[in-house]
Image (cartoon, rainbow, N blue to C red):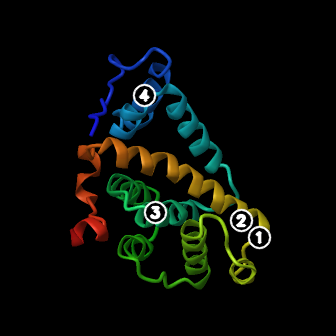
Amino acid sequence: MTEFKTHTIETAPAAAKPSLEKANKAYGFVPNLLGTMATAPAILDGYLALADIFGKTDLSETERQIILMTNNRLNGCEYCMAAHTSISQMANVPTDVIEALRNDTPISNPKLEALREFTTVINQTRGWPTRDDVSAFLAAGYTEQSVLEVILGTSLKVMSNYTNHIAETKLDDAFTPNAWVSKSRAAA
């Protein structure tokens, strides 16, 4: 398989440098995912723009992380699961929610569990939920806007999860304490 380069600010294509500089300022380092995406500045800019837009939804930080981590687990993305565990911890997402997402167990809060279940349906059906699936999600207290915001978060994860799969992105030291192994890889 092709070995993808993880760029630094210095080695990145000129069009990617401003985004990597911004990430370095925000995080104190350039995450390897972003350094890898820098190979194609358009995906880097698209990913960062979509992440910014997703942060402006009506969903809480906990709800956004449920969508992101559910997709990470379903897509088997070990890099993103570790990264979003760290992000969730920094954002004070309840520990029991984080553990449920990492272990594929129900979330004790019924509304949040409905979000996890609906996100799973969106991912596994490739966007073809049944009317009953949508009705159950709405009955849990979510809205039609929320339905579309689950799709937005799922789209964001396609970009990062697929990049990490193809590039075999190395986990950053900052995320190593939250390393996670996909069940499909663990069984291999």
Query: Given this view, does label 4 or label 2 mark the residue nearer the observer?
Result: 4
The type of residue carrying mark 1 is Thr
For the residues labelled 4 and 2, the Cα–Cα distance comes to 31 Å
Residue placed furthest toward the front: 1
User: Considering the numbered disc 4 on the image, is that residue within a helix, a strand or a loop?
Assistant: loop
Q: Of the residues shown, which amino acid type is indicated by label 3?
A: Met
Q: CA distance from mark 2 to mark 3?
A: 17 Å
Disc with the residue nearer the chain's start (2 vs 3): 3
**The N terminus is located in which quarter?**
top left
| Mark toward the start of the polypeptide (4 vs 2) | 4
Residue 143: give its label.
Answer: 1
Upstream in sequence: badge 3 or badge 1: 3
Q: Is mark 2 in CB contact (under 8 Å) with mark 1?
A: yes
Q: Residue at x 50, y 46 (%)?
A: 159
When the figure is inspected, residue 96 is found, relative to residue 160, above or below; the finding is: below
Answer left or right for 48 relative to 84: right
Residue tagged by mark 4?
38
